[in-house]
Image: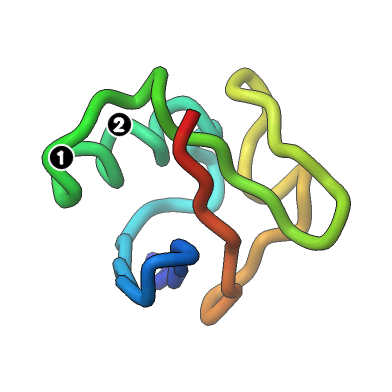
Amino acid sequence: MLEITCNDRLGRKFIVKCLPEDTIGEFKQVLALQMGSKPQNISLKRGYTVFKDHISLQDYEINDGTNLELYYS
């Protein structure tokens, strides 16, 4: 089980628990439930990399304790 932290530019921090096999799309659905938003309106980035929904967390080498940047679209 991984704990991933997502920070938005408004100072809010969300901690999401998920599995390494989960896709970014599944991760965004869980995150959207915590935020009260829609998964389609969420964009996740790390550095200059924008994550695509169909790729798994382990393929992006996202591990326990990773911090991701959260943007709204």
Query: Hey, which residue is sitting farthest front in the picture?
Result: 10
Residue 56's place in the image compared with 20, above or below, is above
Q: Categorize mark 2 by other alpha carbons within 10 Å: few (<14), some (14-19), many (20+).
A: some
Name the amino acid type tagged 2.
Answer: Gln
Q: How is the image coloured?
A: rainbow
Q: Which residue is at 15% across, 50% downward?
A: 34
As measured in the structure, the alpha-carbon distance from the residue carrying label 2 to the one carrying label 1 is 6 Å
| Left-right relation of 14 to 65 | left
* Quadrant position of the N terminus in the picture: bottom left
User: Label 1 crowding class (10 Å Cα cut-off): few <14, some 14-19, many 20+?
Assistant: few
Do tag 2 and tag 1 residues touch (Cβ < 8 Å)? yes
Measuring from the top left, give residue 50's x and y in whole percent.
75, 39
Say what secondary structure mark 1 lies in.
helix
User: How many marks on residues?
Assistant: 2
- In this image, 55 relative to 69: left or right? right
Front residue (pair 14, 73): 73
Q: Which residue is mark 1?
A: 33
Q: Is residue 35 left or right of residue 26?
A: left
Residue 18 image offset from top left, x and y in percent: 37, 54
Question: Given the current orientation, which residue lies at the most extreme bottom position?
Answer: 65
Residue 43 in which image quadrant? top right
Q: Is residue 46 above or below residue 11?
A: above
Amino acid on which disc 1 is placed:
Leu
Residue assigned mark 2: 29
Give coordinates of residue 14: x percent, y percent. Answer: 30, 67
